[in-house]
Image (spheres, grey):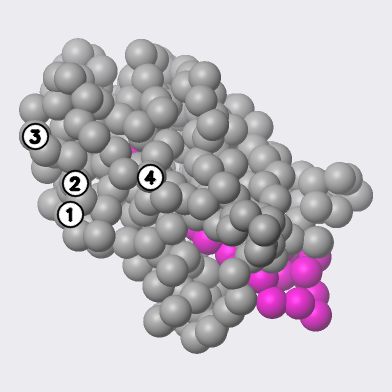
Amino acid sequence: MGVSPRATLLACAIMIAGCSNGPGSARPSPEVPGHEVTSSPQAAPTRAVPRSVVALGDSVPEGAGCGCDPYPELTAKALTVPGTRHVAATNEAVGGYTSSDVLAQLRAKSKVAANVAKADAVDVEVGANDVSFDRSCGTSTACYEKQIPKLEHNLSAIVSRVHELTEGREVLVVLLDYWSVWLGGRYAKEQGSAYVHAASEMTDEVNGIIRKTASATGSAYVDLRAAFKGPDYAYDETHYLSGDGDHPNAAGHQQISAATVNVIDKTLHP
């Protein structure tokens, strides 16, 4: 995502974790309970806590650039109750993957499809690499927007395929979006105002598709832009980013997990 392609949607993240502001944070970090994370109104009113979670997507759920437990694994740990309930996480996210790659994963007769078929919950976070920064396009958003219809088609097809693979069983699909599809925080500012504006516009486009798909398919939706930047998207998210400016650090993964847990809880217990 951004200058370096983002390697691993949604993958399903149910995690606890409070996060503290790192040094260099210009404003207080957004409180998880206060930011707008919503699940689709079409989601099932009552569901059992998942015991198996599969994560699909790019380098974000994969955990690239962190050297820490990524949010899908944190999710399973948060849901596990020692001696009572064990929740297993299978992370199938791959760095650099686009929505086309994830759809191909699910359509192939592979262990990924087999794992999804057995899952109680599937987290998907994908789309940033569909519009990854390209120097030939630069900051011309019109150059990237031609990829948006394909992303919309693929994301809907991904959710449909998950339900096909889990036919006959209830499965919770969780779609996560992005704080920025390119570089974020001070790393974006270092590229200049045109870059910041274009990154914000493309993030709007991608997140809008993810939100729309969640609503149309009855999937849960996690607003990571609000989780990282606050309800008005006004905070600087640098303290949640690794040194590459593109991927979450440990605090970032904790914040993603906390936001996801919040949405999962609202979906299971409306």
Please tell me whether residue 213 is drawn above or below residue 40 in the rendered image: above
Front residue of 159 and 238: 238
Q: Which mark is residue 30?
A: 2
From mark 1 to mark 3, how far is it between C-alphas?
Answer: 13 Å
Q: In the image, what residue type sits under mark 2?
A: Pro
**Residue reaching furthest to the right:** 109
**Disc 1 or 2, which lies upstream in sequence?**
2
Q: Which residue is mark 4?
A: 17
Name above or below for residue 123 compared with residue 219.
above
The magenta segment:
158-179
Q: CA distance from mark 2 to mark 3?
A: 9 Å
Going by the numbered disc 1, the residue's amino acid type is Pro
Which element is circle 4 on? loop
**Residue shown at 76%/77% (left/top)?**
169
- 188 left or right of 16 in image: left
- Nearer the observer, 41 or 194: 41
Quarter of the N terminus within the rendering: top left
Residue carrying label 3: 27
Q: Residue 206: where, in percent of width, then height?
A: 40, 48
Callout 1 secondary element: loop
Q: Which marked residue is nearer to the observer: mark 1 or mark 3?
A: 3
Disc number for residue 231: 1
Number of numbered callouts drawn: 4
Percent across and percent down for residue 22 are 22, 25
Is 143 part of what is drawn in magenta? Answer: no
First of labels 4, 2 by sequence position: 4
Q: How far apart, in angstroms, are the residues tagged by discs 4 and 3?
A: 19 Å
Does the segment drawn in magenta span residue 170? yes
